[in-house]
Amino acid sequence: MAKIDKLIEKMLRLPAEMRFNEVTQVLEFFDWKLENIGGSHYIYYKQKTILTVIKHKNKVVKVYLKRIVNALNLEEWYEKNKK
């Protein structure tokens, strides 16, 4: 299983928090681009959709993980691509 698949599985389990670099790897895999950083707020965009990810002590908490899962349609992608 590829590393990105493991990260997506981890994100779908909605842990209490996830490392920021793991979250950015998933976002970049799905072609989300970092547009701006304002303190702890990282603004990503894809086409005309904007997603704000807040980094706290190098972690992203569950509420933002839920938003990312929904914005990226990860559950649907995982069902289509799981091996």
Image (cartoon, rainbow, N blue to C red):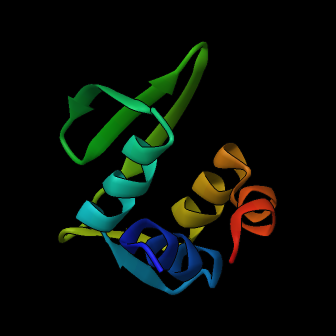
Q: Position of residue 82 (x, y in %)?
A: 70, 73
Q: Position of residue 59 (x, y in %)?
A: 29, 71
How many numbered marks are there? 0
Instruction: Write down the quadrant of residue 39 in the picture.
Output: top left
Q: Is residue 77 above or below residue 40?
A: below
Residue toward you, 7 or 60: 7
- Residue at 46%, 40% in the rendered image: 52
- Residue at 23%, 32% in the rendered image: 38
Q: Residue furthest top?
A: 48
- Residue at 67%, 44% in the rendered image: 71
Q: Position of residue 58 (x, y in %)?
A: 19, 68
Q: Quadrant of the C terminus?
A: bottom right
Q: Is residue 27 above or below residue 56?
A: above
Instruction: Write down the quadrant of residue 78 in the picture.
Output: bottom right
Q: Position of residue 67 (x, y in %)?
A: 63, 54
Instruction: Write down the quadrant of residue 9 in the picture.
Output: bottom right
Q: Say whether residue 72 is left or right of residue 46.
A: right
Q: Say whether residue 56 is left or right of residue 29.
A: left
- Residue at 51%, 71% in the rendered image: 5
